Amino acid sequence: MSVKAIPICAETLTPFMYHSTAVPSGTATLPEIIGDRAIAFGLASTLGMVRASVALPPKDYQRHLRAMPWRTSVLTTTTPKLLSPLVRRLNLEEEGGFPRALQDTVKKGNLATYFLTQEVPPGVTYSGVIFGLDGFDPFKATGQNELVIRIGLHRNGMVRFREIEEVREVFLNAATAKLFGQELPVARYLLHELQLTPGMARDVAETHVSQWH
C-alpha cells in the first residue's frame, strides 16, 4: 500500500472539549493535541462517508479506519490554551426517565449533578499530516483549498484544515498502530487509546503507516 503524507495546519474555529482527563470537580481537555482518530472520523463525516443513522455502530476502530482511504497523525500545538472552566449540569433526577436507583446514587454524591469542563478556544493552531492511501488527497478529491471538520464532545467543535509545505516532526498514535499489529515506542502515554510516539521525519512516518492495513 502506497502512502503519501500531506502536511496540514489545523485552526480551531469554535470552542470544543473532550472528557479527556479528570480534574477536581470535573473534566478537562488535553489542549496540546488533537487525537488521530478524532481527525480521521471528523474527516470521514465531512466527506460524506458516515452512515446516516441516529444510532452508533458497534465500536470497531480497526474495521472503520480500514474503510477510510487515509490515516492521520496526532495533531500537536506549541501554544496550548484552555478557556476558563464552565459549570455544567447533568440533571438525572428530573429528566430522562432514569431508574430510582440511579437517582439515589446521584443524591448520595457519587455522580455530580454540577461539574466543570474546560474547552479549547478558537484560534489555536495545530499541525500534523494526513496520510493519503494509494494516491488519495482530500483536498484534490473535493477541489477545495480548505476543509472544515467537526470534533469534540457531541461534535460541537469546528476545525479548519489547510495544506502546508512541511511539518517539523510527525507524531503517531502507538495505540492506533497496535490495532494494525505494529509495535511503536511510546514517548507520552496520554490515554489508553492515545499514546504519543516520539517525533519522527515524514518519510519514516510514511513507512510505518504503510503497514496500517
Image (cartoon, helix red, strand yellow):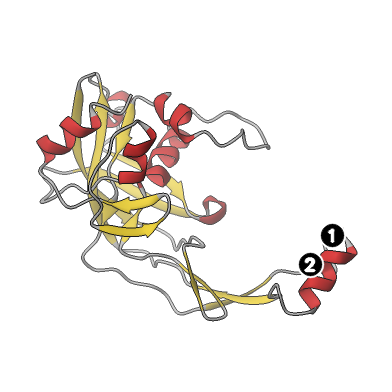
Q: Secondary structure at mark 2?
A: loop
Residue at 29 percent of width and 48 percent of height: 74
Q: Position of residue 172 (x, y in %)?
A: 26, 45
Which labelled disc corresponds to residue 92? Answer: 2
Residue at the location (41% across, 31% down)? 65
Q: Residue at x 33, y 24 (%)?
A: 213
Name the residue located 29 percent from the left edge and 34 percent from the top edge: 182
Residue 60 sits above or below residue 187 on the image: above
Q: Nearer the viewer, residue 74 or 194?
A: 194
Residue named by callout 1:
98
In terms of image quadrants, where is residue 13? bottom left
Residue 191 vs residue 13, the one in the foreground: 191
Quadrant of the snapshot with the N terminus: top left
Question: Residue 158: x percent and y percent?
Answer: 43, 52
What's the residue type where badge 1 is placed? Phe
Do the residues bearing badges 2 and 1 touch, measured as CB atoms within 8 Å?
A: yes
Gap between marks 2 and 1 measured at Cα = 7 Å
| Left or right of 207 in this view: 61 | right
